[in-house]
């Protein structure tokens, strides 16, 4: 018996064929999925992958844009950043005395000044923001906080202010003991 001539070759799609009929061999026993072109499958896979990358980049771009300009919720269309001049600075103010304990510091036009004052001795105090050169009475000015029995942290934010120099004013309303407090934060949002 003569050996059968077998021709080996590479089909388009990267599969080898041995010369016999592929359809006849993969019909009943092995489930044959039908004609597949590997280059075509690769092309579809690459298109899908490129589409996923493009959509991911578009989504990240949209999120970044919203973070930078805001979502139109009345914030003026831009993200505001807090700049702190003072953090965690302790002060003592004599009873019955008022003074500008921080500042003056400059702000740009349209900024809001923020402050947090922490008191652990339940002092009677008034705290506010005053323009440079104004009386340092904490009971007048912008963002006034008053308490006859201050305990914990009091926080406030002024309305938008014109450009200029501003100070943090405190009025100690205690009759005998000094007011001891910490300026936790004093800065501005812009």
Image: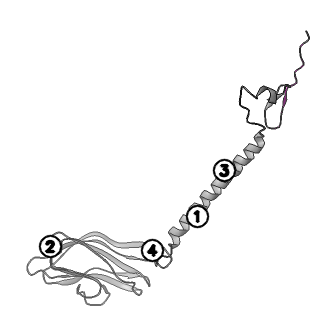
The residue carrying mark 3 is 49
Measured in 3D between alpha carbons, the distance from the residue under mark 4 to the one under mark 2, in whole angstroms, is: 33 Å
Report whether 5 appears left or right of 53.
right
Measured in 3D between alpha carbons, the distance from the residue under mark 1 to the one under mark 4, in whole angstroms, is: 20 Å
**Magenta stretch holds residue 4:** yes
Measured in 3D between alpha carbons, the distance from the residue under mark 3 to the one under mark 1, in whole angstroms, is: 18 Å
Measured in 3D between alpha carbons, the distance from the residue under mark 3 to the one under mark 4, in whole angstroms, is: 37 Å
Q: Name the residue at the right extreme.
A: 2
Q: Please report whichever mark, 3 or 1, sits nearer to the chain's N-terminal start.
A: 3
**Magenta stretch holds residue 63:** no
Q: Secondary structure at mark 4?
A: loop
Q: Please report whichever mark, 1 or 4, sits nearer to the chain's N-terminal start.
A: 1
Q: Please report whichever mark, 1 or 2, sits nearer to the chain's N-terminal start.
A: 1
Residue toward you, 152 or 31: 31
The residue carrying mark 4 is 80
Residue 159 percent location from the top left of the image: 37, 83
Q: Which residues are magenta?
A: 3-12
The residue carrying mark 2 is 122
Residue 163 percent location from the top left of the image: 42, 86
Instruction: Tell me, yes or no, whether the two marked residues, 1 and 2, touch with CB atoms within 8 Å.
Output: no
Measured in 3D between alpha carbons, the distance from the residue under mark 2 to the one under mark 3, in whole angstroms, is: 63 Å
Q: Indicate which label's residue lies in the foreground, 3 or 4.
A: 3
The residue carrying mark 1 is 61
């Amino acid at each position: 018996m003569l050996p059968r001539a077998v021709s080996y070759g590479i089909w388009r799609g990267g599969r080898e064929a041995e010369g016999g009929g592929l359809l006849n061999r993969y019909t009943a026993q092995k489930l044959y999925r039908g004609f597949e072109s590997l280059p075509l499958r690769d092309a579809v896979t690459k298109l899908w992958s490129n589409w996923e990358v493009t959509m991911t980049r578009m989504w990240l771009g949209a999120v970044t844009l919203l973070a930078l300009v805001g979502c139109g919720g009345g914030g003026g269309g831009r993200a505001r950043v807090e700049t702190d001049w003072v953090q965690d600075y302790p002060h003592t103010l004599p009873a019955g005395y008022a003074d500008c304990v921080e500042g003056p510091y400059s702000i740009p036009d349209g900024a809001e000044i923020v402050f947090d004052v922490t008191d652990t001795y339940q002092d009677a105090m008034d705290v506010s923001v005053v323009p440079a050169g104004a009386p340092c009475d904490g009971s007048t000015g912008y963002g006034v906080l008053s308490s006859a029995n201050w305990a914990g942290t009091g926080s406030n934010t002024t309305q938008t202010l014109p450009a200029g120099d501003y100070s943090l004013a405190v009025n100690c309303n205690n009759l005998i003991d000094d007011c001891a407090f910490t300026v936790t934060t004093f800065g501005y949002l812009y």
